[in-house]
Image (cartoon, rainbow, N blue to C red):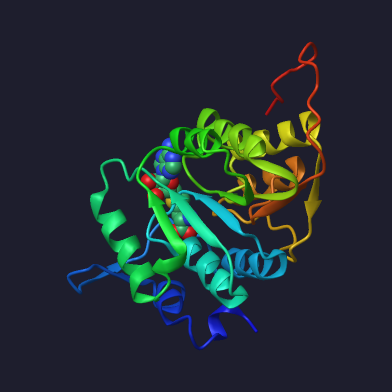
Amino acid sequence: MSILEMPDNTVLREALVDGTVTHPDGHKLKVVANVNPNCCSALHDIVRDRKPQLVVEIGMAYGVSTLAILSALEANGQGRLISIDPYIGWPTGRLVALNQVERAGLSERHEHWHECSYLGLARLMEKSLLADFVYIDGNHNFDYAFTDFFLSDKLIAPGGLIGFNDVGWRSVFRVIRFLQKYRRYREIDVGLGKSYRSRNALFALIRRIEGRSSDDRYFEKIDNWEPDGSCLQIPGP
Ligand SMILES: C[S@@+](CC[C@H](N)C(=O)[O-])C[C@H]1O[C@@H](n2cnc3c(N)ncnc32)[C@H](O)[C@@H]1O
């Protein structure tokens, strides 16, 4: 059953179908920056399938991906989610996201860490916490996306999973190229296929030639191997 057909997913459905989220004072806002419905469904399904104990989400915005993960954990009857988002200059975002989680009745399984991911991920490591799944959808600039991956890789054991949103961004694509070259992961097919859509036909063509598809990609860690460092090069564009 699609995530949108599930009877207990009203709050998520409002966001994905009606395009609205609700502020704690009751007024509705237009949802922004969220994971698209197909990626949301895939995210939900992989959490159902893998049954992780600890999921870490980087980038919560209005909580659309958050609800996809939490509703799957709830259906699993186990697991918790830590969402890391500093909401810099966007206090309303945080209020709305936490209200969405509360309205969905999923707060029990959820914690929001109000800080940047590089601090939150490092803090998780300090506590010796291992995540089973990290979903990366925070700041997509190369330095931040790379740091998110670098630290997430340290936070998961072999068998753990990392998911990337906005993989059509050149910066995120380069991070994935690094992962494929300098770490040992296998890509998991979550049924999203390859999409190269863009508002501009030329950009869509360039994306297709470069293999920069736009829907989420997931990778399972095989082992903890790292190169010795002497031949490391940042992947090109
Ligand atoms: C694309 S939105 C996330 C959308 C969300 N996953 C959803 O489906 O609704 C990106 C989010 O990343 C957050 N962000 C920006 N810099 C960040 C950082 N350094 N660490 C964690 N989150 C960050 C922003 O505040 C924003 O809420």
- Above or below residue 153? Residue 68 is below
Outermost residue on the top side: it is 230
Is residue 70 among the parts visible in the rendering?
yes
Q: Which of 161 and 65 is in front in this view?
A: 161
Asked whether, in this view, residue 96 is left or right of residue 205, the answer is left
In x, y percent, where is residue 67? 47, 68
Residue 190, percent from left and from top: 74, 63
Foreground pick, 154 / 144:
154
Against 197, is 208 above or below? above
Looking at the picture, tell me which residue is in the foreground, 121 or 171: 121
Residue appearing at x 59%, y 34% in the figure: 151
Residue sticking out furthest to the bottom: 7
Q: Which residue is drawn at 80% across and 31% down?
A: 181
Dividing the picture into quarters, in which one does residue 176 lie? top right
The reply, left or right, for residue 3 in relation to residue 10 is right
Q: Quadrant of residue 125?
A: top right
The quarter of the rendered structure image containing the N terminus is bottom right
96 to the left or right of 153: left
- Which residue is found at the position 39% from the left and 54% from the top? 61
- Return the x and y of residue 10 as percentages of the image width and height: 43, 82
Residue situated furthest left in the rendering: 25
Write the residue at 38% across / 59% down. Answer: 32
Q: Where is residue 106 in the image (x, y as percent from the top left)?
A: 43, 71
